[in-house]
Image: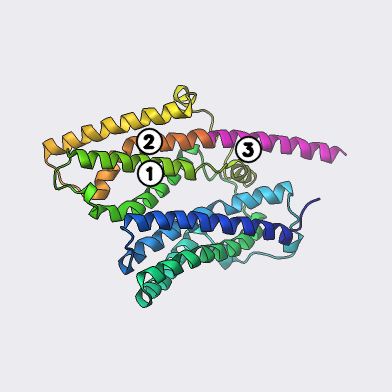
Amino acid sequence: MIPEYLTFIRYQDKKFLVFIYLISFILLGLYWSNTGYAAGLQDVGVISAILTILLFKVIYELKAYWAYKCVVGTVDLSFFAGKKIKRYETVMTHPLVISLLAYAVFFAVYKSIFSLLSPQAALNSLVLTAPLLIFIVFRLMRNSYIKQVATAVVEKVKYKHLYRYVCSNVVLSLVLTLLMISPLRGDEDFSFEDGFFSPRLMIAMWILCATVLIINILFMQFPKHYIFLGRLFLNEVDFYFSTSVPFSRLHAKPQWYKLLMIMMIEAGWIVLMSALMMLLDFNVCFEAWFLCCFLPCLGFYALYLYWNWHNDFMMACDMYLRWGEIKKQSNLW
């Protein structure tokens, strides 16, 4: 029996609310620990940017997900019968527009809270209210995107290759990472006072790069085959979106082998870059130095995304073809 839309979203909302609270708590907790458990008014801009990126990631794939739901018919959407999307609503609900508006709201709300309350009380308010604000935007966007699905099919492919799709996600994850680690610039372990070739600095940077890589890998474990299936239905991608796997021999290796290999490469890279910076006598900011050291891990992360999403896309293609056969059989009957 196909569930009614309102029944389905009640079930979905409960799961999503737990999920968004968990993710928000992890991100805000990590940032708070990086500040030395002393987040204050000066951190409002960075915290607002972190929440905005989280919101963008949540709503960016929402239309494709509901395209899959609408076409396959796993949910009864008669609730939307006769409801049309208005032109201004299409513009205003674009993920980028919503994210910019959300940043302004987050900044205004939490600047006021941190100005009026003690740091601890303000932080408690942040943890409790931020996921709720994201949840409210998610619900509003969901209704709008479902109404847009009928007119959202495009004539021109939006993503020509998985490389571009992966690159955009890597850049967004990198921006989020830089925001998360920005308070560490004042940490004693990352001080440049003893030079770039300081064992303490090199070990601290290796641990930071390894930790960031592991956290990013854990956060991207959610499957995307339904998202890719929705994009196939919307004609945003075609069957040439991903045709092969780069570094297939490395891809075939066990997971522990790949992680061990990249950790060893990362350690050698940091030592090499530290020696080079010492010889050239360069001065760079903490974020630039982290980016330089993180390059091997960043390349591996991009490969890891590609390998996993290639498999998800292949699964989506298989589901798309099976759905086409099912529709043909249904028409014959």
What residue do we see at 22% from left, 51% from top?
Answer: 188
Structural crowding at the residue carrying mark 3, measured as other residues with C-alpha within 10 Å and reported as few (<14), some (14–19) or many (≥20): many
Relative to 258, does residue 109 appear above or below in the rendering? Answer: below
Residue holding disc 1: 212
Q: Nearer the viewer, residue 161 or 276?
A: 276
Q: CA distance from mark 1 to mark 2?
A: 13 Å
Assess whether mark 2 and mark 3 are in contact (beta carbons under 8 angstroms): no
- Left or right of 78? Residue 275 is left
Whether residue 174 appears in magenta in the rendering, the answer is no
Which-is-in-front pick, marks 1 and 2?
Answer: 1
Q: CA distance from mark 3 to mark 2?
A: 25 Å
- The mark found on residue 316 in the picture is 3
| Dominant secondary structure, magenta | helix
Assess whether mark 1 and mark 3 are in contact (beta carbons under 8 angstroms): no
Q: Amino acid at mark 1?
A: Val
Residue sitting farthest toward the top: 249
Q: Amino acid at mark 3?
A: Ala
Please indicate, yes or no, whether residue 280 appears anywhere in the rendered image.
yes
Residue 228: percent from the left, percent from the top?
59, 42
Residue holding disc 2: 299
- Left or right of 42? Residue 229 is right
Disc on the earlier residue, 1 or 2: 1
